[in-house]
Image (tube, helix red, strand yellow):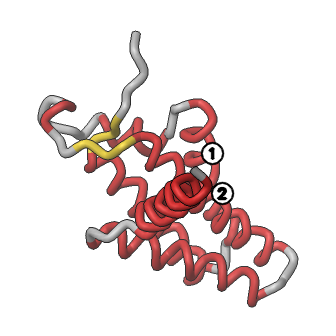
Amino acid sequence: MTKPISVPRPLVRVNQWAIFLSVVITWVTGQYWILAIPLIANLLGIFTGFNPIMRFAKIFLTKDIKSYIPEDIGQQKFNSAIASICLAGGIVGFAFNWPVVAYSFTIMVAVASFVAILGFCIGCFMLFQFKQYQYRRTVKNS
């Protein structure tokens, strides 16, 4: 069996909503352990290719999986890594009662996930800029 090279966009959107809503629920309830749900799901997705949030959402897809707009799996793993760092930073900040750290990280991941839901992927832009930097550096050194 070959590894998938893409993820259907609706599954990516569900994951983005899970991140965003977990942050909002954490802010409203003060229960910072809720951030661990998308953190664990995204870490599993990065390291094993199995994101339980996306796998659960896959049940509700109504069309053939190939008929959805594909999102690059490598890009999604990069975005998940950034989200995981922010979610973990938020958990640490709340756990140690460092509100500046907690809210800085959770605001970043909430804004990034919500903006991605609206259609602009900040992580994609960051990765593109990094790859452009690498390319320019390679061309300059040639």
Residue drawn at (74%, 89%), measured in percent from left and top?
100
Residue picked out by circle 2: 36
Q: Give the side of residue 113 with respect to residue 7, left or right.
A: right
> Is disc 1 surrounded by few (<14), some (14 to 19) or many (20+) residues within 10 Å?
some
In the picture, the quarter occupied by the N terminus is: top left
Q: How many marks?
A: 2
Looking at the image, is 35 positioned above or below residue 51? below
Please name which of the two marks, 1 or 2, marks the residue nearer to the observer: 1
Q: Judge whether residue 19 can be spotted in this image.
A: no
Q: Do labels 1 and 2 touch, CB within 8 Å? A: no
What amino acid type should be assigned to the residue bearing mark 1? Answer: Leu
The location of residue 37, given as percent across then percent down, is: 59, 54
Give the CA distance from mark 1 to mark 2. 10 Å
Residue picked out by circle 1: 43
The location of residue 42, given as percent across then percent down, is: 56, 48
Q: Give the side of residue 34 with respect to residue 125, left or right.
A: right
Q: Quadrant of residue 62?
A: top left
The location of residue 29, given as percent across then percent down, is: 60, 79
